[in-house]
Every structure is written in C-alpha cells, then in structure tokens.
C-alpha cells in the first residue's frame, strides 16, 4: 500500500512539477496515521533518483509550544491539540519555504525530551521538493487555514479509528509507558486530536484510505 501511495505522488510530480522550481506538498492526517512514513518514503525515492538534497521533509512538530508555556496556560495535559502549537511561526516558515530564495532554518521536535531544538534543521535553497507533514495542516479554522495558499498539493491519510487506537497505544508503550498510562495518553489526548483532524480538515487533493 505504501509503495502505491508513493507512486501516486511521484506520478503527480512528473505531471505538475517543473524542474528547477520548488514545489511544496502538505501531508496531513491524525496522529499515528503514517504521515512521516509516507513523507520520508517519498523523499527517499526522489533523492535516490534525482540526487541527495533534491527533496526534504519538514515536520510540523517542531512548532510545539514549550512545556513551560503550556503549564502557564493550563494546557500541558492537551499537548498536541491545535492550540498548543506556534501556528504563526509555522505559517511564516512555510511562506519563506515557498519563496525559495535562501536557505531556511527550522525547528525539530525531540520526543525524548518533549521539546524542540530551535534552528536544528536546514532546508537548502536548491531543494526542489519540500514535503511538510503534520496533523493540522488542512484545518479549516484560522490561523491554521492561513497555510492553504502555500501548498501546491495536499494529501490526507488515515486508517480506521480502531487501527489508530492500536498504533497510538503502541507508540506510548514503545516510549516506556505502562499499558494503563499508554491507554490514558491515547484516549484522553491523542484520539481527541485525531477526531479534530478528521472532522475539521478540508478535503485534500489526494486522500489515502488505509485498512
């Protein structure tokens, strides 16, 4: 299935991407939907055929607000919800990416410390295919909707909610949480965010439905 999805994206690029220009693709979906996997597989495939540095992935997760800010706002328990991100910072980054007139630095989220490293990533000026991936890239509400003009192609991917639940619990178990803790993290936060993504995202150009 994953190879079919990547092939669809490669076919789109063949038809719509003019070499020597930059194209920006948004890959959205709920947590645990495989956004990173699809994005990285696409970029790896492009770089293998076109040369290293031709394509890159920019994760939205680098724009998590710090735990200190979330504690101050009483939102730490809902970290990952739409209002727990620096959306304006993300919009500014994507706008600069579309201009393609300079190297661009961007933050990278480190799940081991639950915080972002500022300016840890570098997108070179000459990178032609940029894949931005994240949960809320297609949300219809402002300020997330301000991202819409900057994407050349939008992609939405999601499995069933039962499969999402299984994946999200497994994710927290893999990070050392107990079964009970993992289930609470999934049920009281991740799946609430997943419902927001599914219910409030605008229709994407390409929709990948997983089993």
Image: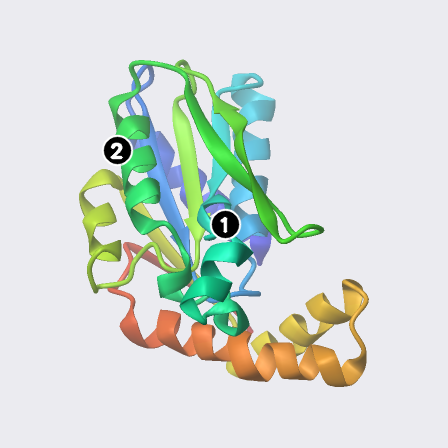
Where residue 204 sits, quadrant-wise, is bottom left
Would you say 77 lies left or right of 175 here?
left
Mark 1 crowd level (few <14, some 14–19, many ≥20, 10 Å Cα) = many
In the rendered image, is residue 209 in sight?
no
> Could you give the CA–CA distance between mark 2 and mark 1, rounded to whole angstroms?
17 Å
Q: Tag on residue 95? A: 2
Q: Which residue is mark 1?
A: 61
**Residue that appears at 52% across and 77% down:** 189
Q: Quadrant of the N terminus?
A: bottom right
Q: Is residue 63 above or below residue 167?
A: above
Which residue is found at the position 56% from the left and 58% from the top? 34
> What crowding class fits label 2: few (fewer than 14 Cα within 10 Å), some (14-19), or many (20 or more)?
some
Q: Which numbered disc covers residue 86?
A: none
Residue 182 placement: quadrant: bottom right
| Element at label 2 | helix
Q: Quadrant of the C terminus?
A: bottom right
Instruction: Please tell me which residue is depicted at 27% across the width and 33% down the height of the picture.
Output: 16
Which x, y percent locates residue 151? 27, 41
Rendered location of residue 72, percent (x, y): 45, 63
Q: Is residue 90 visible?
A: yes
């Amino acid at each position: 299935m994953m190879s079919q999805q990547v092939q669809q994206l490669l076919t789109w690029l063949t038809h719509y991407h003019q070499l020597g220009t930059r194209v920006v693709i948004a890959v959205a979906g709920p947590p645990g939907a495989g956004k990173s996997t699809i994005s990285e597989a696409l970029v790896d495939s492009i770089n293998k055929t076109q040369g290293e540095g031709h394509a890159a992935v920019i994760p939205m997760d680098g724009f998590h607000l710090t735990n200190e800010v979330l504690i101050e706002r009483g939102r730490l328990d809902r970290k990952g919800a739409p209002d727990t991100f620096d959306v304006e910072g993300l919009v500014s980054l994507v706008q600069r990416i579309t201009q393609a007139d300079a190297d661009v630095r961007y933050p990278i989220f480190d799940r081991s410390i639950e915080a972002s490293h500022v300016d840890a990533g570098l997108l070179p000026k000459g990178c032609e295919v940029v894949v931005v991936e994240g949960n809320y890239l297609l949300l219809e509400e402002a300020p997330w909707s301000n991202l819409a003009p900057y994407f050349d192609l939008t992609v939405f991917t999601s499995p069933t909610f039962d499969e999402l639940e299984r994946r999200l619990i497994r994710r927290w178990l893999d990070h050392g949480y107990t079964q009970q803790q993992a289930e609470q993290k999934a049920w009281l936060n991740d799946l609430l965010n997943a419902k927001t993504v599914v219910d409030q995202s605008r229709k994407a150009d390409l929709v990948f439905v997983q089993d």
